[in-house]
Image (tube, helix red, strand yellow):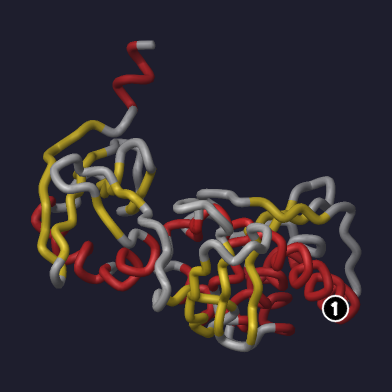
């Protein structure tokens, strides 16, 4: 028990930073096991920046500013004084990402219709019935449903092109991975990929299917990826901006 505490990240300081009209609260931690700086956002602890040994605390503000676009996109509101992030309920006029585009949200109440989410061109109608809150839950449910419709055909398309076969395909909501491939040839993809441009989604799929040929990240593996995704470096760099993609890709 004592050993685990010794190697766990420890708090260096808590601070806040003004970005636009918002005050961003965050915790700076240091970890002797960390090799690179990473940003973590958890409902129970809020925004944390984990620093490896030797990384200057003075650089954290610049790092947070460089990620302000991601923060504004995924963490839309913050609880004043608590330092914990909250995702506020969606309102008519908000926009949400979907396959590289922005969908305008229209929230409907007391229509007599059951709770549901429907897309019409570039508008997303969230019918809440008599409910006042729960729009975020409905939105995530819609993303998951769309992921189960959209991702399997994309995977099968690239399986045919790459001449590979997998065992099972799982659509999950991992916090640290966009995708993975197991030694049992099971492919897992994150439903949050639907917030990304389609070319980036294709890169993740190609990346995982390439592991069916090369279960590693050797030069040979990247040669396989490059055969089917010439701009894989750009796609990989794009995903590196988001904390969910810090593992594997």
Q: Where in the figure is residue 125, as x and y percent of width and height?
A: 57, 74
**Of the pair 56 and 195, the residue shown nearer to us:** 195
Residue at 81% x, 64% y is 213
Q: Is residue 106 toward the left or the right of residue 77 in the image?
A: right
Q: Which residue is mark 1?
A: 157
Q: Residue drawn at (9%, 56%), measured in percent from left and top? A: 58
Where, by quadrant of the figure, is residue 153 drawn?
A: bottom right
Q: Position of residue 22 (x, y in %)?
A: 16, 63
61 relative position to 75: left or right: left
Location of residue 196 in the rendering, given as x and y in whole percent from the top left corner? 55, 75
**Can I make out residue 249 in this image?**
no
Element on which disc 1 rests: helix
Residue under the point 52% across and 81% down: 103
Residue 16: % across, % down: 11, 52
In the picture as drawn, the residue positioned furthest to the top comes out as 1
State whether residue 93 is above or below residue 28: below
Above or below residue 48? Residue 237 is below
Q: Which quadrant, please, contains the N terminus?
A: top left
Q: Residue at x 30, y 53 (%)?
A: 37
Q: How many marks?
A: 1
- Callout 1: few (<14), some (14-19), or many (20+) C-alpha neighbours within 10 Å? few
164 and 62: which one is in front?
62
């Amino acid at each position: 028990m004592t050993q685990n505490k010794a190697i766990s990240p420890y708090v260096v300081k808590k601070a806040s930073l003004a970005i636009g009209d918002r005050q961003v609260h965050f915790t700076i931690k240091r970890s002797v096991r960390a090799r690179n700086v990473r940003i973590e956002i958890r409902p129970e602890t809020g925004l944390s920046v984990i620093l490896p040994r030797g990384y200057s605390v003075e650089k954290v503000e610049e790092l947070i500013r460089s990620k302000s676009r991601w923060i504004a996109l995924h963490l839309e509101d913050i609880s004043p004084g608590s330092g914990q992030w909250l995702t506020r309920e969606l309102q008519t006029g908000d926009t949400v990402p979907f396959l590289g585009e922005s969908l305008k949200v229209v929230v409907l109440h007391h229509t007599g219709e059951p709770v549901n989410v429907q897309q019409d061109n570039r508008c997303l109608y969230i019918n809440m019935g008599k409910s006042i809150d729960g729009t975020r839950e409905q939105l995530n449910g819609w993303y998951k449903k769309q992921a189960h419709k959209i991702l399997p055909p994309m995977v099968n398309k690239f399986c045919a092109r790459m001449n590979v076969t997998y065992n099972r395909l799982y659509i999950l909501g991992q916090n640290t991975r966009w995708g993975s491939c197991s030694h049992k040839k099971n492919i897992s993809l994150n439903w949050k990929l639907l917030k990304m441009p389609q070319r980036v989604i294709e890169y993740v799929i190609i990346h995982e299917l390439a592991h069916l040929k090369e279960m590693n990240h050797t030069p040979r593996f990247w040669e396989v990826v490059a055969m089917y995704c010439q701009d894989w470096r750009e796609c990989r760099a794009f995903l590196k901006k988001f904390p969910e993609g810090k593992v594997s890709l």
